[in-house]
Amino acid sequence: MATETHGAENAAAAASACVDSHGSAVGMPQLCGEWIGNQVFWLVITLVVIYLILAKIALPRIASVLAERQGTITNDIAAAEELKRKAEESEAAYQQALADARAQAQAIAQKTRDDIKADLDAEMAKADEAISAKAAESEKAISAIRASAMENVEIVAKETAAALVAALGGKADDAKIANAVSNRLKG
């Protein structure tokens, strides 16, 4: 019984070493030598709890969000590159079709010139009408090909612009994109 009383007296004496007669702390309580062990204990407990919360809950969630965002960005970039490739293919097809139409127009014109030379005296008037008609057909074909190609380029440009705006995190407004693409194609 004496040891229990003696232990309680020591604890009271140790606690009273950092407390004045009014029960107020003397100086800075966090620097009181008798309390440092208790403070270190609770500091270690707090740090372990914070570490466990961060390691088991917060950091895995953050890592999964970052991985998801990276995947989305990678997919959007790949889609934009695919649309760009399609636009380049459409432009190449347009250029090829235009070159073929010009070559065809040249061949038709040369054939017509050869026919005119063969029948120069008798068929001069008929040959001029045939050349005019064939040249008009060729120009219509070229105009149709050019219009079709420009429509395809405009469609691909709108899709590419919408995909790029979405990839950069914006909201793609179809009317604004259509207006911007139309203005850009006009010059």
Image (cartoon, rainbow, N blue to C red):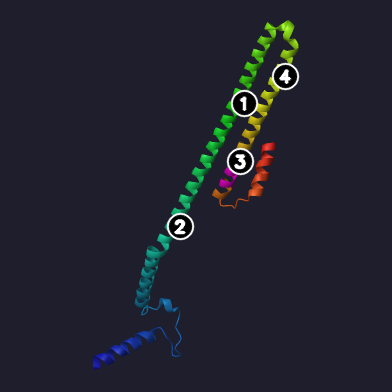
The residue under label 4 is: 132
Residue 57: quarter of image: bottom left
Magenta part of the protein: which range?
A: 154-163
Q: Looking at the picture, does residue 127 appear above or below residue 144? A: above
User: For the residue labelled by badge 2, is the local secondary structure a helix, a strand or a loop?
Assistant: helix
Inspect the magenta stretch and tell me whether residue 27 lies in it: no
Judge the density around disc 1: few (<14), some (14-19), many (≥20) Cα neighbours within 10 Å: some
What residue sits right under mark 1 in the picture?
A: 98
For marks 2 and 1, give the CA distance. Answer: 49 Å
Q: Position of residue 104 (x, y in %)?
A: 61, 20
Mark 3 and mark 1 residues within 8 Å of each other at the beta carbon: no
Left or right: where does residue 54 sit relative to residue 126? left
* Residue at mark 2: 65
What residue does disc 3 label? 155
Which quadrant of the view contains residue 15? bottom left
Q: Main secondary structure of the magenta part?
A: helix
Mark before the other along the chain sequence, 4 or 2: 2
Task: State which tag comes first along the sequence, 4 or 3.
Answer: 4
Up/down of 129 relative to 81, above or below: above
Tell me the kind of residue under disc 4: Ser
Mark nearest the camera among 1 and 4 is 4
N-terminal-most mark, 1 or 4: 1
| Residue at the image point whose x is 53% and y is 43% from the top | 80
**Residue that appears at 75% across and 12% down:** 125
Residue 90 horizontal/vertical position (percent): 57, 34
Circle 2: is it few (<14), some (14-19), or many (20+) Cα within 10 Å? few
Name the residue rendered at 63%, 22% in the picture: 102
Amino acid type shown at disc 2 = Val
Q: Check disc 1 and give the amino acid type.
A: Leu
Mark 4: few/some/many CA within 10 Å (<14, 14-19, 20+): few
